[in-house]
Amino acid sequence: MPDIAFVNDVFLPLSEARVSVEDHGFQFGDGVYELIRVYAGRPFHLTEHLDRLEQSARAVAISVPYTRERWTALVAEAVSRSRYPEAKVYIQLTRGAAPRDHVLASPVLPTVVLTVRALVPPDPVLYARGVDVVTVPDIRWAWCNVKSVSLLANVLAKQQAREKGAFEALFVRDGQVLEGATSNVAVVRDRVLITPPEGPLLLSGVTRKVVLTVAQQAGVAVKEEPLTEADLSTADEVLLTGTTIEVLPVARVDGRPIGAGAPGPVTRLVMDCFRRALA
Ligand SMILES: Cc1ncc(COP(=O)(O)O)c(C=O)c1O
């Protein structure tokens, strides 16, 4: 089977998957999601992704219809049906389908959508040379720790980045650099890896956590501290982390080179350690 979907208890080809136009996810962006990377047929840090899915759902009072065992079995079955060894599993959970009204007139079952697609990794050139990023004002809401499907601000930010020839947009709020539109950010200063602390203004990335762990294990000092725009532009190195990009070096911020304008030694070490942690 090629790309596959699971919609409310039924597996089918992705091209045939449908949800109601009255679904709250479609009408209001009223839902939460996860994206999980599969390496050699094995979901990477599935427990952490399911923890975050449950936390996101709880934060916005969407009931989670499946037990942990059921989600785990479902992901395993979906991956095995797809037969893609390298894949991305997308899970979306919305408040459900009901006649359009902000408030549900009566309880409905949440909608579960799960898809599996082949993972096409980013171009290796990006890792070898580093990418461009731009800074943008953070116009998102105040619960960025919830992995909500309401991604309009992220879509616009990413679009802005692309129009400027950049790979990613970094959100800046009240002078603080928080994260990318689809990634977390860290800098290196004097060989110390620094990333903004977890909190309501950024997503607690699964990759971010793995990177902090492998960096520490490799002897790199790690700090979770707020980052200003000046911290970013004067950093020795800047890097992005995320499920599909893993660890990606940043060469330029708003057109200005970071360090030598090429991946620095700590970033290369962390990239290496991350890839070894996958084996
Ligand atoms: C806004 C945002 N921050 C951070 C991340 C990185 O999170 P993870 O490492 O769990 O993929 C993502 C991933 O989609 C994201 O959308």
Image (tube, rainbow, N blue to C red):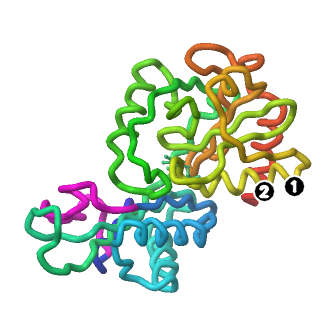
Using the image as rendered, state which of residue 64 and residue 165 is in the foreground.
64
Asked whether 63 or 242 is in front, the reply is 63
Q: Is residue 156 left or right of residue 104?
A: right
| Amino acid type assigned to the residue bearing label 1 in the image | Gln
User: Which image quarter: residue 23?
Assistant: bottom left
Extreme residue in the left direction: 99
Horizontal side of residue 210 vs 170, given as left or right: right
Q: Position of residue 28 (x, y in %)?
A: 22, 55
Disc 1 is placed on an element classified as helix
Q: Which residue is mark 2?
A: 213
**Mark 2 vs ligand 1: CB below 8 Å:** no
Give, as a three-letter code, the residue at label 2: Thr
Which residue occupies 49% across, 57% down? 88
Which corner quadrant holds the C terminus?
Answer: bottom right
- Residue behind mark 1: 217
Q: Residue furthest front?
A: 174
Magenta-tinted stretch: 11-32
Is residue 260 left or right of 186 when viewed as pictured? right
Q: Looking at the picture, how far across and down is residue 172, in whole percent?
A: 52, 32
Identify which residue is drawn at 64% across, 34% down: 124
Question: Residue 58's x, y, as percent?
Answer: 42, 72
Quadrant that contains the N terminus: bottom left
- Looking at the picture, tell me which residue is in the foreground, 131 or 121: 131
Residue at 19% x, 80% y: name it.
Answer: 107
Magenta-colored stretch includes residue 69: no
Vertical comparison of 238 with 233: above or below? below
Query: Which label was assigned to residue 176?
Result: none
Q: Position of residue 264 (x, y in %)?
A: 79, 28
Question: Do labels 1 and 2 touch, CB within 8 Å?
Answer: yes
Separation of marks 1 and 2 at Cα, in angstroms:
6 Å
